Every structure is written in C-alpha cells, then in structure tokens.
Amino acid sequence: MALIIDGKKISSEIKDELKVKVAELNDKGIQITLAVIQVGNDPASSVYVGNKKKACEYIGIKSLAYELSQDTTQEELVALVEKLNEDSSVNGILVQLPLPSHINEDTIIQTISPLKDVDGFHPQSVGALSIGQKGFVSCTPAGVIQLLKRSGISIQGKECVIIGRSNIVGKPMALLMLRENATVTICHSRTNNLKEIAKRADILIVAIGKPLFVTKDFVKEGAVVIDVGIHRNENNKLCGDVDYVDVLDHVSAITPVPGGVGPMTIAMLMSNCVESVLS
Ligand code: NAP
C-alpha cells in the first residue's frame, strides 16, 4: 500500500518547530520582520499574501504589508525595495509574483538584497545553490526535500527524474536533489522518450503545469512520486500534474493534491525568514 505523504502534517510540524525558535529569538530580543509587497489585487495573489501573513502571525514573525495599486510604476517599486533593503529592522522582502506586465520581474528580483531574498529567486541565491554555498533556497523545492526526508525516504544514490525546468521549481529542485546525492535527470517539453526516461526514476518529481499529465505509463513500479502541479479541474476541484488515481497502486509513496507539496511552500518561506536572522 502506498504511503500518502502528508504535506499538511509535515508543514504544521515545521511551523511549530519554527514557532519555538522564534520565541527563543524573541527572548533574546531578536524580532523577525518580513515585508510583503503586492502590486494590484489579483485574487489568487491576495489569497497567497493572506496565507503568508497568517503563517507569520502564527509563528511570531512580524509582517509588514505593502499593498500597491495596479498602476504602480517600476521605478516606484524599485524605490520601495531599495528602501526596505536599507531598513535594518526588515529581515526578509517578498514581492508577490506575477507582477503587472509593465513591470519587469527580473529587475525587481535583482533589486532585492540577496541577504533578504527569502523567496530564493535572486541570481546570487541561485548561483550559491549551484556551487554549494550558503544562500536562500526557493521555497517549493526546499519543501519537497523536507517532505522526502521527513517521510523517511532516502535520496542518496537514487535515480531522480524531474519533469519541468522552470527557474522557481525544476532547476532548483534538480540542484537540491544533486546536493542530496541523487543521480538527477531533468526533462522538459523538448525531451525525447519522456515516458521511458520517467520510468527510470526511483523518485519522480513532476512540475509541468499540465493537469493529470503523468499516468502510470510514466512511473516505475514502486517509485516515489512528488506532484508539484496544482490546478482546478472543470468541477472546481484541485488536482495535480499527476493522475493520482491512475498511479496510486503503482507507487511506494506519493504526494496528494491538495495536501502534498502545496502547504510546504509557506512553511519553507517561514523557515527562510528565521534563517535570515541566524545567518
Ligand atoms: P512553468 O514555469 O510553466 O514550467 C513548466 C515546465 O514544464 C517547463 O520547463 C516546460 O518545459 C515543462 N513542460 C511543459 N509541458 C511539458 C511536456 N508536455 N512534457 C515535458 N515537460 C513539459 O511551471 P512552474 O512554475 O515550474 O510550475 C509547475 C506546476 O507547479 C504548476 O502547476 C504550478 O501551479 C505548480 N506550482 C506549485 C507550487 C506550490 O505548490 N507551492 C509552487 C510553484 C508551482 P520547457 O522549459 O521546455 O517549456
């Protein structure tokens, strides 16, 4: 019977551990502050920002909300980020993506000080990860590593196939699995023989953004399957990139959607905020 990896439970454990650490820091007079910037009022972004604020509150991190109008200019946003970079009472800066199309996301990401880059998207953070140096790690892939470790799934020496090569999931995921001594293959939309390659995986990580794309023809018997995808189907129900029902009796462990990878992202963001005062 497959292990259903419980991301809700694991993320709660992490948040509770962080709450204890933050209380200890508070006792030493250290307060953690996260600045969260949202431009416009995209409903999905508002939900994500609201959840981040709630998590901060639970753990004892102070959150500063900057809710900017949709017509904020790039110059105004850069100026705000630079001001927060200089503000020694702010430990982490998060700019909720996507930004309106008149603002260049790369410019904004690169304006955030790498010392406050709790999303782990700054090129310096990504570079540090690729050469094994200390730096903030992108939250969703960091969450996948925690799911595997805390479920007792060993990574070292395993054949890991990652489907997807985005900057925020696929690429950092590959670097993290390499850091954990897996043998890593990255697949993407131009990969030939995708099913055959995916079937080699002991650990298959799927982040392609296509609902129910991965069926059991992609999965080796007994593999661990991690589904990063998240979508709403025609009945308004959440589903992942993996056809969970189809693969379930074929795998040794799997993350459900919802309740798998999803809850881990905020937990790891909170972990990065705590790291920001420890490093
Ligand atoms: P993305 O930027 O759209 O990247 C998708 C990747 O999948 C690309 O590298 C693309 O290849 C590859 N791909 C697309 N179609 C493919 C195909 N038919 N065969 C093989 N590879 C294919 O997406 P993302 O930001 O990484 O997100 C992926 C999924 O994870 C989405 O459903 C997103 O909502 C979800 N997500 C969840 C969380 C969370 O749970 N907290 C966080 C982030 C993302 P090319 O590079 O060749 O185009």
Image: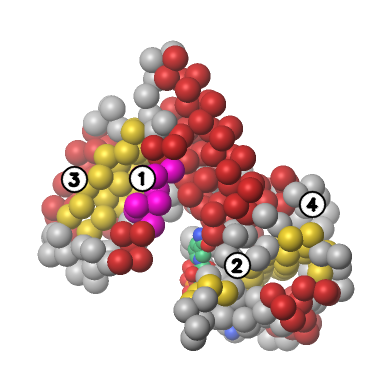
Q: Is residue 124 magenta?
A: no
Between tags 2 and 3, which lies in front? Answer: 2
Between 4 and 79, the residue placed more toward the observer is 4
Q: CA distance from mark 2 to mark 4?
A: 19 Å
Between 139 and 134, the residue placed more toward the observer is 139
Between 170 and 59, the residue placed more toward the observer is 59
Is residue 176 visible in the rendered image? The answer is no
Which label sits on residue 153? 4
Name the magenta segment's main secondary structure. helix
Which label's residue is closer to the chain start, 4 or 3?
3
What secondary structure is found at the residue carrying circle 4?
A: loop
Report the label total: 4
Is residue 2 visible in the rendered image? The answer is yes
Residue 88 lies in what quarter of the image?
top left
Q: Are marks 4 and 3 in contact (CB under 8 Å)?
A: no
**Image location (x, y in percent) of residue 154:** 81, 50
Between tags 1 and 3, which lies in front? Answer: 1
Q: Is residue 31 above or below residue 55?
A: above
Label 3, on which residue?
80
Label 1, on which residue?
53
Which label sits on residue 257? 2
Which label's residue is closer to the chain start, 2 or 1?
1
State the scheme by which the image is colored: secondary structure
Which amino acid, mark 2? Val
Q: Magenta residues, as a range? A: 48-55
Which amino acid, mark 3? Leu
Q: CA distance from mark 4 to mark 3?
A: 43 Å
Between tags 4 and 3, which lies in front? Answer: 4
